[in-house]
Amino acid sequence: HDGTDFYGTTITPGMEYSYLFDSHLAIEGMGRYATTQGYDENEPSVGYNIDMAHFDLGTKYSWLLAPDTRFGCRAFAGTRLLFTTKQAAKNECCAECGIGGSLNLINKEKYAAGVNFDYVHAFSSKMTDRLVINAVWQIIL
């Protein structure tokens, strides 16, 4: 909910790259794309689309909890591009930042699966605060 606008949930494809300095500290580059539907409570029969592209850089610190389980915390900042089909709204580019965590299960074949959870704040009047929960599949090089 954002003023008189309501938004739905979405499935978001994305990619991340982590460069590890040691077994704990990494820098990350992230990109993701989201599309969702919105509607104005004054005109609930008229919906519109919102597309967002996110590009962020961040740092991550992680701990090995067990031989095959890793927990991490991260902080990131970047840019969000927002495109909408709503006639009264403008497309925008704004800064965003966030914090998050991850829990990954690593197998012996150099793959990992897990979940990421991020809190993202955009410096904008539209969709300023979001909680993002991602299922993750990783290739470990």
Image (cartoon, helix red, strand yellow):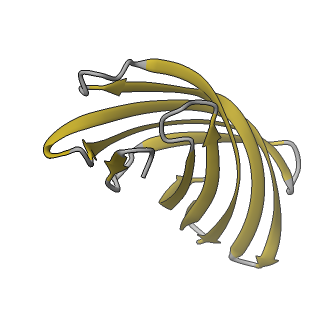
In-front residue for pair 2/16: 2
User: Would residue 56 be found to the left or right of residue 8 on screen?
Assistant: right
Image point (55%, 66%), residue name: 115
Image point (62%, 47%), residue name: 120
Q: In this rendering, is residue 101 above or below 87?
A: below
User: Would residue 2 be found to the left or right of residue 56 on screen?
Assistant: left
Res 141 seen here: no
Res 81 seen here: yes
Q: Which corner quadrant of the image does residue 5 belong to?
A: top left
User: Would residue 17 be found to the left or right of residue 66 on screen?
Assistant: left
In-front residue for pair 92/133: 92
Q: Which corner quadrant of the image does residue 76 belong to?
A: top right
Image point (24%, 26%), residue name: 85
Image point (48%, 35%), residue name: 126
Q: Where is residue 30 in the image (x, y as percent from the top left)?
A: 59, 37
Q: Where is residue 19 in the image (x, y as percent from the top left)?
A: 74, 39
Furthest toward the front, the residue is 42
Q: Where is residue 4 in the image (x, y as percent from the top left)?
A: 37, 45
Q: Where is residue 92 in the image (x, y as percent from the top left)?
A: 47, 19
Furthest toward the left, the residue is 45
User: Would residue 34 be found to the left or right of residue 59 on screen?
Assistant: left
* Number of numbered discs visible in the structure rendering: 0
Q: Which corner quadrant of the image does residue 51 belong to?
A: top left
